[in-house]
């Protein structure tokens, strides 16, 4: 089975559509949306509807992210000013059905030897970040699953560890299939679809082939001008548009 | 993890287990068969005792990662890989031939034989590095000479794929390699430099040439450090018959600083195949090891190199320090084109550090008539061509190590150029195309055949022409061969 992972879409319609097109070209059997459908971007309505449709028609697995959770009841604890402004705006944009869709999402999902989670395995609803090997190790030790796929950080990064040694970080190359094999656990942090922060502005997604046990980080360019223009038009904080161009 | 104990006669995933060929601390090796596979195969199974520290199988994990991603005659063909979920194993081609370990019994070998074996292994290294993999455990027992003559590497347990995670990074506190062969940078825990394989090949060839290991058989990790500061005994001191060119090659491979070694396996191969073109430096004539003070200084300096962090992977090994072949036409009336070719060569070399220029001229032989080595005035044609070739390159101002000269003799210049490019692993060919004409288009030209069949990038150099015909011809050629720039 070929699984496509999309994380941190952040209401970026152009990036989502570009990724879905790219996904279709690669041919996949299942989609997993790793949370943060909304927040930051100017198209929360379109993105929520599109993802709901994918769950309906293609049996996509859809997880809750911290921005989605915040948008449900406008609880923005721990968020910076820009994120908070965007959440309040997003909440007003969404209708009751869309809010209910978000409310129905869970922060993690397990299947076979895989854990899907927005943030980390120690406490999926506490939204901890995995930014280094020690944090990745903490998460891998908290699950019995061999493979973890998560988002939240907006920077593609891969970690692996054996039972007796500390975890190791690896910076993956785009398009290079990496075998997640051996007598060890792996944790693949996805890049962001809608707001990349690894200094590469292209939208990011991941492809896992369960037969070969190979994971590939992929990128696709999208119409940043349109996405940024809509952020300006919605009077959302300017920085949310500017950072799309530089991927930071 | 529960494992079944394999026995001769068992069937596992369609493979019938045959005789046990080897049982080691890391893995056991079984001859196996499977219907539909018509070449000899073996199954490698890691030795895992329940409850034992899992680190002994990291090498097996590396092989599972790397081997299926390799192809070509210089590695074993992979048939199947089974992950740790059940019984882990790798089924691969059983390479028929002999390991270089046997050849060691005959050392010291004659210099030409050392160069011949070195060239075979260098060809295999070029291919491996092109696939983004460093072997990092080059030694006689890990090199098989196929019955068909090619060298093939086995045992990739310490190898590194530069685009994949290094599973051995976690074993960071121990230098990983085989005592006599390990490179200084591996001693310092750097596993990202293709030139480490060149160092180990140098140790192997030194041993073949002298029957002596340059740093003996170090038993402790501390003793491995000697190669950071102690230069080996010059091979010619041990075996006076060794010519200066071979000592130059061996000692250049064994430089403690990778920057001073051959930048690529292709460049080492080039020297092994063209002894007469090896640029001799002080290394070639050295008859003593460095003195006490120099060694002491190096030793102090090496002490500061400890505790290095894992290195970032640099440029792809295959793209650095290219070999550029200039096909020089020395015929009368072609002076302007020859100059245009020289200008192009100058541009390429200017922008690419470490590039090496091979100037090639083909002396066309008649297919039927006898060929006389002397011209009408009694000059040796081959020698006079060589002189002209050197004359052509002089304005480029290249030093002896950056340029070599070759006069090929063949009735078919295009094929001769292509063969030379292949056997020397040229990365780019610069070739002139004469003016275009309909006749030339239909009969074909040397340059168009080279463009069509070359194994690498080809740049076609042409004199600017106002002739419309020429433009059309160029466009057509570019369509056929995207690698060519006209």
Image (tube, coloured by chain):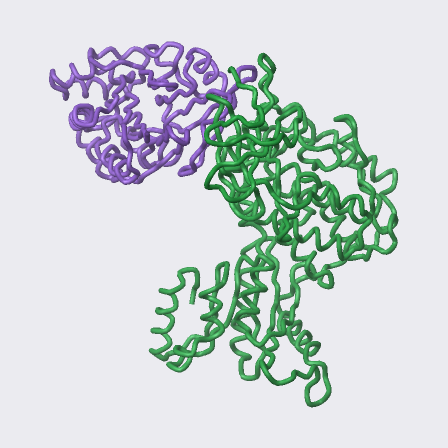
Residue A4 percent coordinates (x, y): 31, 30
The residue sitting at the front extreme is B9
Please determine whether, in this image, residue B456 is positioned above or below residue B465: above
Left or right, A134 with reference to B114: left
Please determine whether, in this image, residue A193 is positioned above or below residue A111: below
* Corner quadrant of residue B384: bottom right
Q: Nearer the viewer, residue B353 or A33?
A: A33
The residue sitting at the bottom extreme is B376
User: Looking at the figure, which quarter contains the C terminus of chain B?
Assistant: bottom left
Residue B399 percent coordinates (x, y): 68, 61
Name the residue rendered at 55%, 74% in the picture. B412
Q: Nearer the viewer, residue B475 or A223?
A: B475
Count the numbered circles shown: 0
Left or right, B379 with reference to A19: right
Q: Nearer the viewer, residue A3 or B432?
A: A3
The residue sitting at the left extreme is A96
Please determine whether, in this image, residue B68 is positioned above or below residue A99: below
Residue B483 percent coordinates (x, y): 43, 60
For chain A, give the colour. Answer: purple
* Corner quadrant of residue B363: bottom right
Q: Tell me, yes or no, if residue A36 can be seen here.
A: yes
Please determine whether, in this image, residue A215 is positioned above or below residue B354: above
* Corner quadrant of residue B408: bottom right
Q: Tell me, yes or no, if residue A235 can be seen here.
A: no
Name the residue rendered at 57%, 43% in the picture. B75
Q: Nearer the viewer, residue A82 or A200?
A: A200
Residue B447 percent coordinates (x, y): 48, 71
For chain B, give the colour. Answer: green
């Amino acid at each position: 089975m070929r699984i496509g992972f999309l994380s941190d879409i952040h209401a970026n319609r152009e990036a989502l559509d570009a990724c879905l097109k790219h996904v279709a070209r690669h041919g996949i059997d299942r989609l997993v949306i790793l949370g943060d459908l909304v927040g930051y971007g100017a198209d929360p309505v379109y993105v929520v509807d599109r993802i709901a449709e994918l769950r309906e028609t293609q049996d996509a697995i859809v997880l809750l992210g911290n921005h989605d959770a915040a948008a449900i009841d406008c609880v923005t604890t721990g968020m910076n000013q820009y994120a908070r402004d965007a959440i309040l705006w997003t909440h007003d944009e969404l209708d009751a059905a869309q809010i209910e869709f978000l409310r129905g999402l869970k922060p993690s999902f397990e299947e076979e030897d895989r854990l899907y989670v927005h943030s980390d395995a120690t406490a999926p609803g506490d939204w901890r970040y995995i930014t280094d090997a020690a944090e990745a190790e903490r998460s891998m030790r908290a699950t019995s699953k061999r493979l973890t796929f998560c988002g939240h950080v907006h920077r593609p990064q891969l970690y692996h560890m054996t039972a007796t040694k500390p975890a190791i970080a690896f910076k993956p190359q785009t398009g290079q299939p990496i075998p997640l094999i051996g007598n060890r656990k792996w944790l693949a942090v996805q890049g962001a679809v809608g707001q990349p922060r690894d200094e590469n502005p292209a939208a990011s997604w991941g492809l896992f082939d369960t037969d070969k046990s190979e994971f590939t980080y992929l990128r696709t360019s999208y119409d940043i001008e349109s996405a940024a223009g809509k952020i300006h038009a919605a009077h959302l904080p300017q920085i949310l548009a500017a950072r799309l161009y530089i991927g930071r | 993890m529960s494992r079944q104990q394999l026995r001769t006669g068992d069937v596992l995933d369609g493979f019938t287990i045959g005789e046990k060929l080897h049982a080691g601390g890391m893995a056991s090796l079984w001859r196996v068969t499977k219907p539909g596979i018509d070449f000899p195969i073996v199954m490698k199974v890691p030795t895992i005792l329940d409850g034992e520290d899992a680190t002994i199988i990291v090498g097996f994990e590396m092989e599972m990662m790397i081997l299926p991603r390799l192809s070509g005659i210089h590695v074993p063909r992979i048939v199947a890989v089974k992950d740790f979920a059940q019984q882990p194993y790798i089924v691969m081609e059983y390479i028929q031939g002999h390991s270089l370990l046997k050849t060691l019994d005959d050392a010291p070998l004659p210099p030409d034989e050392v160069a011949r074996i070195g060239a075979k292994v260098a060809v295999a290294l070029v291919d491996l590095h092109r696939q983004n993999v460093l072997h990092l455990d080059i030694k006689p027992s890990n090199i098989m000479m196929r019955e068909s003559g090619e060298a093939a590497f086995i045992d990739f347990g310490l190898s590194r794929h530069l685009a994949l995670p290094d599973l051995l990074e976690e074993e960071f506190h121990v230098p990983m390699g085989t005592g006599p062969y390990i490179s200084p940078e591996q001693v310092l825990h750097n596993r990202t430099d293709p030139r480490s394989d060149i160092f180990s090949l140098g140790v192997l060839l030194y041993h073949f040439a002298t029957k002596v290991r340059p740093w003996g058989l170090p038993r402790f990790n501390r003793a491995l450090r000697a190669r950071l500061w102690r230069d080996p005994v010059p091979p010619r001191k041990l075996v006076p018959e060794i010519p200066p060119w071979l000592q130059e090659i061996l000692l250049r491979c064994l430089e403690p600083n990778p920057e001073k070694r051959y930048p690529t396996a292709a460049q080492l191969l080039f020297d092994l195949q063209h002894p007469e073109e090896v640029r001799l430096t002080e290394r070639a004539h050295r008859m003593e090891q460095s003195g006490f003070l120099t060694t002491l200084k190096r030793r102090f300096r090496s002490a500061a190199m400890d505790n290095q962090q894992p290195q970032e992977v640099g440029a792809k090994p295959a793209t650095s320090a290219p070999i550029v072949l200039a096909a020089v036409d020395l015929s009368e009336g072609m002076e302007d084109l020859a100059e245009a070719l020289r200008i192009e060569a100058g541009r390429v070399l200017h922008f690419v550090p470490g590039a090496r220029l091979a100037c090639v001229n083909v002396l066309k032989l008649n297919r039927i008539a006898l060929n006389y080595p002397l011209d009408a005035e009694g000059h040796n044609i081959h020698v006079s061509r060589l002189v002209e070739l050197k004359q052509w390159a002089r304005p480029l101002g290249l030093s002896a190590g950056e340029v070599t000269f070759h006069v090929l003799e063949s009735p078919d210049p295009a094929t001769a150029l292509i063969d030379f490019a292949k056997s020397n692993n040229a990365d780019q060919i610069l070739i002139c195309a004469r003016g275009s004409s309909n006749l030339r288009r239909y009969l074909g030209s040397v340059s168009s055949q080279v463009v069509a069949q070359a194994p690498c990038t080809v740049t076609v150099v042409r004199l600017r022409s106002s002739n419309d015909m020429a433009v059309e011809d160029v466009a057509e050629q570019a369509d056929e061969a995207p690698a060519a720039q006209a």
